[in-house]
Amino acid sequence: MAAQRVLPQSKESLLQSYNKRLKDDVRSILDNFTEIIKTAKVEDETQVSRATQAEQDHFEMHVRAANIVRAGESLMKLVSDLKQFLILNDFPSVNEAISLSNQQLRVLQEECDKKLISLRDEIAIDLYELEEAYYSSSCGQWDGVELPLCEAFHRQDSWGSPEMTSSTSHVNPEDSEHLGTQESMQRQHNGHGSSASDQHQS
Amino acid sequence: MANDRLRALEDVEKEIALVLQSAGTIVLELSKEKANASLLDRQLNQFQTSINRVESELSGQIRYLTQVATGQPHEGSTYSARKDCQMALNRAEYARVKLGELGRTCEMMLDPQT
């Protein structure tokens, strides 16, 4: 509780310090600029010689101009601090930014998934036709044993090159798992395919 | 909303630069033998307008922050939505890679026949 009471006070004192800095810097710019304009006025009667007075005025203008620039820099720093404070503590806008971002990401994800599902449906239709062609042709047989399509695909890869044979032998355990998942996916999504193969066997 | 306030603060920065520029132009014009009165008037008006705008805008922002600021950190995040979107894009990329492999295999099979 004590910690919670301390934090708001520091935020309040921070905002009060921002107000003070703003007032001081604006006041500094206005006063120094007014004094420069007043000093620019040429006076006939001077207490010291004209050259000395000119030198003094020149130095004073230099200092006041430097003060104006310093106040301008301080205002820039104040703006930077306000931007930082705004980003960290302006909860309404942070909430809005978060919800907008979440909405955009969700829309993108839904669009992606919708397109993947439509792609899956199209490929399922084409795969049905491919399986029909495959199981009714001689390619589906190897040494008199009927091969599933994925197994024949895998064997075709290994026939392709001797290098691939060694590489496939290395990744065989992963591939067999992958084949297992592919076969199970096929059985799940292509019920007509499995029924076609059952028909061929019978 | 957040972007509007930040954009307003960026405009304030430009106004501050305009204040210093107009002050410099006025002093430069006064240093000449024959000062152009109309230019002096214009630059002085610009100086006063800009400094008033800077002060009012910054006071407004500080007033808004006084009303809105709490002592607590904001704990909101877009992590979950971003992760889900990233996984969806990964799924699409995986499908694309697999379809590419399938396409290449079909082309390989077709080439000896043609």
Image (cartoon, rainbow, N blue to C red):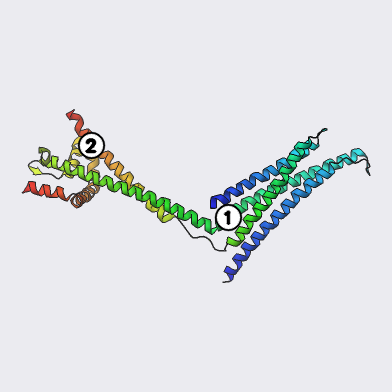
Q: Is residue A154 left or right of residue A69?
A: left
Quadrant for the C terminus of chain B, please: top left
Say which residue appears at 18% left-offset and 51% top-offset: A187
Q: Specify the subunit that label 1 lies on.
A: A
Quadrant assignment, res A137: top left
Task: Mark 2 vs mark 1: tell me if same chain.
Answer: no
x and y percent of residue A84 in the render? 58, 53
Say which residue appears at 49% left-offset and 57% top-offset: A95
x and y percent of residue A148 in the render? 14, 45
Q: Amino acid at mark 1?
A: Leu
Q: Is residue A173 above or below residue B32?
A: below
Which residue is outermost to the front? B38
The crowd level at tag 2 (other Cα within 10 Å; few <14, some 14-19, many 20+) is some
Say which residue appears at 66% left-offset and 48% top-offset: A76
x and y percent of residue A80 in the render? 62, 50
Q: Is label 2 or label 1 in front?
A: 1
Q: Amino acid at mark 2?
A: Thr
Residue A86's disc number = 1
Say which residue appears at 32% left-offset and 49% top-offset: A113
Identify which residue, A17 or A34, lies in the foreground: A34
The crowd level at tag 1 (other Cα within 10 Å; few <14, some 14-19, many 20+) is many
Question: How far separated are the C-alphas under marks 2 and 1?
Answer: 57 Å
Quadrant assignment, res B65: bottom right
Residue B53 visible to an observer of this rendering: yes
Residue B105's disc number = 2
Element under disc 2: helix
Q: Is residue A113 left or right of residue B76?
A: left
Residue A76's disc number = none
x and y percent of residue B37 in the render? 79, 37
Q: Specify the subunit that label 2 lies on.
A: B
Which residue is outermost to the top? B114
Residue B86 visible to an observer of this rendering: no
